[in-house]
Amino acid sequence: MKIKTGYRAVTKYLIASPFKIRPVADLIRRRPYPEAMALLENMPHRGARIIRKTVKSAASNALNRNKQLNEDMLYVKDISIDEGPRMKRIWFRARGRADMLLKRLCHVRVVIDETGKAGK
């Protein structure tokens, strides 16, 4: 995986399907930080809460490292929702049969950077 420069935050092993969270991530990719947070706060999706916490953590990492930064100077450079391991559970069915129930996990990686930098 290519490492992006910027301020990062990672949330791992979330019990949520990556397929349900990726559409939310696509909406905030390459947006200014205040606009992305406003979008995430007003979305009813469960994935929006998960992503909001990770984006907020990445922004606080940026603000704590560089004291000259302001929230208005940040933007979501990259966000990726990767698939994690699957929890396998037994789902009992009729006539003594059983199915495998897969509970999907995901990893959320957010990279936030300054808007004034070249390469946007």
Image (cartoon, rainbow, N blue to C red):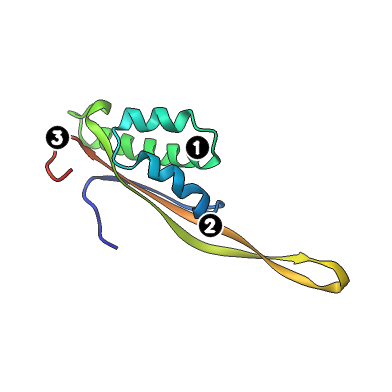
- Residue type at mark 2: give it: Leu
Mark-to-mark CA distance, 1 and 2: 16 Å
- N-terminal label among 1 and 2: 1
**Could you say which is closer to the camera, residue 11 or residue 47?**
47
**Could you say which is closer to the camera, residue 108 or residue 45?**
45
In the rendered image, which residue does mark 1 sit on?
A: 49
Residue at x 38% of width, y 35% of height = 56
- N-terminal label among 3 and 1: 1
Q: Indicate the secondary structure of the residue bearing disc 3.
A: loop
The disc label shown at residue 105, or none: 2
Q: What residue occupies the far left of the structure in this picture?
A: 118
Residue at x 42% of width, y 31% of height = 39
Mark-to-mark CA distance, 3 and 1: 28 Å
Residue at x 22% of width, y 30% of height = 73
- Residue type at mark 3: give it: Gly
Mark-to-mark CA distance, 3 and 2: 35 Å
Q: Position of residue 95 (x, y in %)?
A: 88, 72
- Residue type at mark 1: give it: Arg
Q: Please tell me in which quadrant of the rendered image residue 6 appears.
A: top left
In the rendered image, which residue does mark 3 sit on?
A: 116
Query: Mark 3 near mark 2, Cβ–Cβ under 8 Å?
Result: no
**Mark 2 surroundings within 10 Å by alpha-carbon count, few (fewer than 14), some (14 through 19), many (20 or more):** some
Q: Position of residue 45 (x, y in %)?
A: 54, 38
- N-terminal label among 3 and 2: 2
Q: Position of residue 21 (x, y in %)?
A: 49, 48
Residue at x 50% of width, y 54% of height = 19
**Mark 1 surroundings within 10 Å by alpha-carbon count, few (fewer than 14), some (14 through 19), many (20 or more):** some
